[in-house]
Image (cartoon, grey):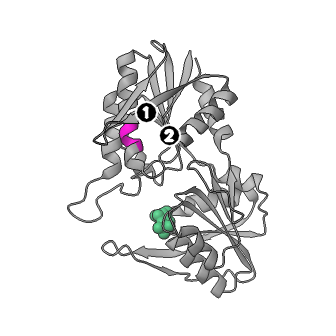
Amino acid sequence: MTVIVSGSRVHSRLLGELLASQLGLKLFSVEGRRFPDGEIYVRIIGDIRGEDVVVIQSMEPPQNDALVELLLIVDALVELGVRGITVFTPYLPYARQDRVFLSGEPVSVRVFLKALRVLGVERLVVVEAHSERALSYFQGEVINVNPLPYMAKIRGFTSDTLVISPDLGGIGRAVSVAKAIGARSDYIVKRRDRITGGISMELGSLDPSGFDVLIVDDIISTGGTIAEASRMLLERGARSVQVLVVHNLNLPGALEKIRKAGVLKVTTSNTIPQPDIDFLDVIDITPLIANILVKWLR
Ligand code: R5P
């Protein structure tokens, strides 16, 4: 049989409950606590020897704690003698450091994905992992779920919307959304200074005047990318700007920065816990994941 094991943090448990009830599977929660020196302790209570296990670990900040806990959970499952391990990390941290940009840097996401594989994880399921390159470092089966077309459709964005990626690297996301709603897509040219982290943008020949624009991206971190893109689009005559993003990291000040730049609303998913505020529209993407997991249930 297949069972679900969720990490000890609140959002991991919540996602675990949602998926377990949609799939009719038994859910085991991890007992997690800290040693006095801050080290993480986990224990999985229950008889799951010989079972196939889907581990659900939410990776919102502080993501380093979530990472260490996940590695410990996988090792505990191997010790318990489970049959197979699938890991579902709705948001994959460190994915943006998927290469050496400046000499002397690590390929951070590779470290984490290699560790999971070496420990015995067979299959990895993630939601919008920033780049295929990031996932190429996992030498097992990988499923990268793009929830943006689903999100755009259920919120009823229409074919007269202009769908914009804030950089060339994200054009595939904008195209996938545009296709789903029968709209046009385009992109902004963004450059990032790898030393200071600062960004500069150019609209080039892109003409948003008169359009209701939907900016589509994988992640809001500081909010700088979306805020700058929105400002430029409105200055160039866009009628309105909304945002559709998979992961909102919910860092202090980011949404406010985006709101002040003139964005009407941000639509995001529940890969990461979200605050309950009017400016933010949160879509549950667990039905999409349940549809994928159901294919492997034994
Ligand atoms: C960049 O490649 C990503 O797709 C996002 O656009 C970026 O990481 C967002 O970061 P921030 O919100 O800090 O501008």
Residue 74 in the image: state x and y as whole percent: 39, 29
Residue 10 in the image: state x and y as whole percent: 55, 41
Prevailing SS of the magenta stretch: helix
Q: Nearer the viewer, residue 48 or 113?
A: 48
Q: Is residue 153 magenta?
A: no
Residue 90 in the image: state x and y as whole percent: 53, 44
Residue 291 in the image: state x and y as whole percent: 66, 33
Relative horizontal placement of residue 110, taking residue 228 as reference (left or right)? left
Residue 20 appears in view = yes
Give the extent of the magenta segment.
Answer: 66-70
Q: Amino acid at mark 1?
A: Gly
Please rate how many residues cluster around mark 1, counting C-alpha atoms within 10 Å: few if below 14, some from 14 to 19, many from 20.
Answer: some
Q: Amino acid at mark 2?
A: Arg
Eyeballing the image, is 35 above or below 226?
A: above
Residue 125 appears in view = no
* Disc number for residue 9: 2
Picture mark count: 2
Q: Is mark 1 within 8 Å of ligand 1?
A: no
Eyeballing the image, is 283 above or below 158?
A: above
The residue pinned by badge 1 equals 32
Residue at left 58%, top 58%?
173
Q: Nearer the viewer, residue 125 or 249?
A: 249
